[in-house]
Every structure is written in C-alpha cells, then in structure tokens.
Image (cartoon, rainbow, N blue to C red):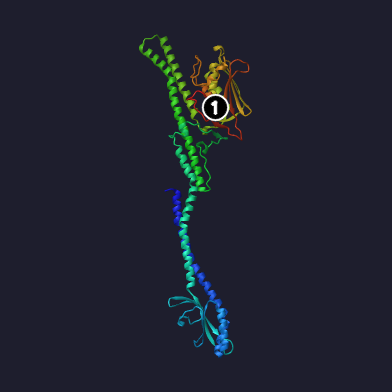
Amino acid sequence: MKLSTRIALWAAAVVPLLVALAGLLLLPLVGRDLRHQQDTRLGDRAAAVLPSVRALVAAETRGRPKVEQNQQRKVLDAALDSGVRVTAQDGTVLLSVGPQPADGQAFPAAPGGPVTVRDRGTAWRVLTVHVSGTGAEGGNGTLWVSEPGGLAGDQTAAVRRRVLLVAAVSAPLSALIGFALAERATAPLRRLSRRAAELDPAAAHSPVATGAPATDTGVAGSTASTGSAGSTGFAAERSGTVEVDELAAALALLLSRYDEQALRTAQALETARSFSAAASHELRTPLMSLRTNLDVLAAHPNLPSSERAEIVAELRDDHTRLLDLLTALGTLARGDLVEIDSFAPVDLADLADAAAADARRRHPAAGFTVELPPELRVFGWEPGLRIMLVNLLVNAAVHGRRGGTEPARVTVRLAPAGTVALLTVDDTGPGIPPGEREAVFHRFHRRRDSPGSGLGLTLVAQQAALHRGTVRITEPLGGTGCRVEVRLPLPTADAPTVRLPARRDWIAGEEH
C-alpha cells in the first residue's frame, strides 16, 4: 500500500473519531448551558410578574374582585410564553395560564430554585416562589413559573445530530485532503526511487555503464571535497516538509556517493585490466631473452667463463629491466587510482632537495646544481611529487650526457612565478627535437639506446596533470641540451588549490 493511501485511510478514521469525541465532550456542556439559560429566563419571568402576583394575592385576601382581575391581566402581560400558576395560602388557584403541568400535584410545594418535574411523561422546568401580599392584610401565596423541560433536550439532540453529520462528512473529506497532501509530500521520495533505479550500473543509460566522466572534485586547503548530487544528475527538491526534505537530501548524497564509487570501481577494474595487458605485452621480450639465455646456459654447461659471465650480465640486465618496468607500471596505476584525501600541503623545495641528494648517490658521475628557495609549499600528493622529481632527475642524468661520453650536468631550479610554482630541470645532453617533444610523454616511448622502461616521463606528465599543472620540454637559455619545465598551482585562499582531473587513464590510454 502506498504511503499516501495509508495516510488517507488514517485521516479518514482519525478525524471523524476526533469530531465524535469532541461532540461527546461538548454535549454535556451544551445541555448545561441550555438549562442555565432556561433557569435564568424563569427567574426573569418570576421577577417580572412578582409585583402583580403580590397585588393579586392581596386583592383576593381583601375581597376586591376588580383589583384582582386587573392584576391578573398584568400577570398575563408579563408572563409572555411562560406558564404561571398562583395559589392562595389555602390552596385556592388564583391564576393558571400558559404551558404548565396539568396535574396540580406535580408542582413542588417548597420554594427553591428551578427543578424538573414530570407530568404524564412530559418533563417541565418549574420555579417555585413564596409570595407575601402587600399591606397589613396582604396574605400569602405561592407562585410557580414553568416551561417545558424538553426544550433543552431538543436543542441538545439537534447539536448531537449535527456533530454526527459533521463526523460523517469529515471522513471522506479528510481522506481526500490527507491523500492530496501525502501525494505532494511524498513526490520527492518517488523521484528518488526512480532515480535510484536508473543508477543501476547494469542499465544502459547509467553513467557508470556508459563510461561518462566523473564530476571534478575540488579541495580547498586541506579539506577534501564531498561531492554533490549533481554527479548523479539529481538535485534534492524542497517539499516544505522538514522530514521529507532531510531524507531527500540524505538520499541524494547517498546516490551521488554510489555513482562516484561505482565509477571509481569501474576505473580501478579498467586500470587493472590495462596493467595486466601492458605488463603482458612489455614483459614478453625480456622474458623471452631470459629464457633464451637460461636455455643456453643449460645446454652448454662447459661454456668458457668469459661467455658465461656475458650471459649472466645479460640476465641481470633483463632482471633489472623487468623490475623497473613492473615498478613503473605499478606507480602509474597508483596515480590513476589516487583519491583526493591523500593530498595535503607539501614543501616542494624540501622534496626537490631530497631528490637531488638521492640522484647524486645513484649517479655519482653526474654533476647536480640545485637552486631552491627556503620553502615553497603546494597542495599535493607527496608520493606522486616525489615520483615526478625522481624521474625528472634520473632522465636528465641518463640522457643528459654531452656527446654520449661526458658526464651529465644537471641544474634544478625552483621558484614561485605568480600563481604557480615553476620547476625547471636542465641538462647538457643532445636535447629533443621539437617534433618529438610531445611523444616522449607517451607510454613506452624511448630511444633505441635507452636503458629505461619508457615510462619515466609518462609518470612526470601524469603527476603534473594530477596536480592540475603542466609540463613541457624546451631548450635551456644557452640553447644546448634539454629543459623540462613543470608548473604547479600554488595554494590560494579564495579558490580550490587542486582538483583531480575527470579523466585518469594513463595506464590505459595514449593521449591525455
């Protein structure tokens, strides 16, 4: 059963019940008020006729028939629609007019407030007043003022019928109103349900299934972006009901997280497949070389020591190449899968100094000159920036040899340049022709005599793009050698410092 239908049924049941309960509480109060009004009216009638009744009793006692008749007319004029009965002290009825009990025995003998009496099944409301005649020989008598007691009951019954009518009418009316309000209040929930069904990754129109790019993620300072409902194509609408709006907002955020995580999972699976394919393709040659050399050693156990040493050296080179290739592929995959919460403020000058010190140990023949500021902070992924610096310096040390024989001379400079940090690495090698400067950043692009895996500069380009920076190859100021220039954005107070790119498939694709 729909929620709106449930609400309508509950409204149809509860509202009439409340009306009936309110009627039950009101009916005794209404009856009491009506009796009070009737008693007040009887008191007013008694007060109005009392002077004439006193004169009437006195006239009857003194034997003055004309005066008595005159007073009777006055009593009739003042009685209006109430019943009036007057008796003398000896019980003689002096006046009996208007609606009243037919049986004189039904009238209460003792004076007092209004009481209800019954005569032949009919209820009467009667007020009894003791009357003292005027003058020294006025005499005494009794005054009764009466009205039908069923008037209050009739009016109470009419109120009861109206309450029952209102309760009967309120059942369908409250059901319709409750259904309409519930339908409007639950409309965002129905839209959320439809949107959630559309987010099934197996659906053809799902952003995950179609490979649609994810929404950029922003970071300000050290706070990671939380994403938004816009990544799922859903925006939580306001219904005017606090509980529904809170639920809609929570579900919208949940759906956006689902979409984001599903896309990241799909990217991770694609990265794993690409890693496997690339490793299988690139490892085939060194593995075949390893197998060939091992077969030679096995088939010729009596090889001369010089030839055996040459084969063992080739085996070591192939083993080193395999390790370097697997390490580079793993590092490239890490860059494709890194999350924004791994980013933090990093001192790029300190990282560059540490990378230069490590490069001196690994390549003692090369000369390294470092020009760094005391501190230059960027907001980034520290392992990725370290990978970028290490590969820049290794590339310069390996390929920066002048004439292929003289040791490389490498100069590392870092300085702020407006809103970016400018990092340059110069070497004294043969340089790179302008037509090939873009291709060197592609996966597995290397010279024939290069000992590397062809992924060093690809890792540099990946990290530059990951930090929303740029990398390019130019010539040093002297015109000889090669310069790699990297620009990374500096932190700003009024804008996100870094946003992860929407597309991160360096291990799977060639163009970026």
Tell me: residue 286, above or below residue 127.
above
The residue at 45%/21% (across/down) is 323
Residue 145 image point, x, y percent = 52, 79
Tell me: residue 481, above or below residue 74.
above
Q: Nearer the viewer, residue 34 or 463?
A: 34
Residue 292 visible in the picture: yes
Q: Nearer the viewer, residue 219 or 274?
A: 274
Name the residue tied to disc 1: 465
Tell me: residue 238, above or below residue 10.
above
How many circles with numbers are drawn on the protein? 1
The residue at 46%/49% (across/down) is 4
Residue 211 image point, x, y percent = 47, 31
The picture quadrant where one finds residue 426 is top right
The residue at 49%/21% (across/down) is 443
Taking the view exactly as shown, the residue that stands out farthest to the top is: 304
Residue 138 visible in the picture: no
Residue 120 image point, x, y percent = 43, 78
Tell me the element at label 1: helix
Residue 337 image point, x, y percent = 48, 30
Mark 1 nearby-residue class (10 Å; few <14, some 14–19, many ≥20): some
The picture quadrant where one finds residue 320 is top left
The amino acid pointed to by label 1 is: Ala
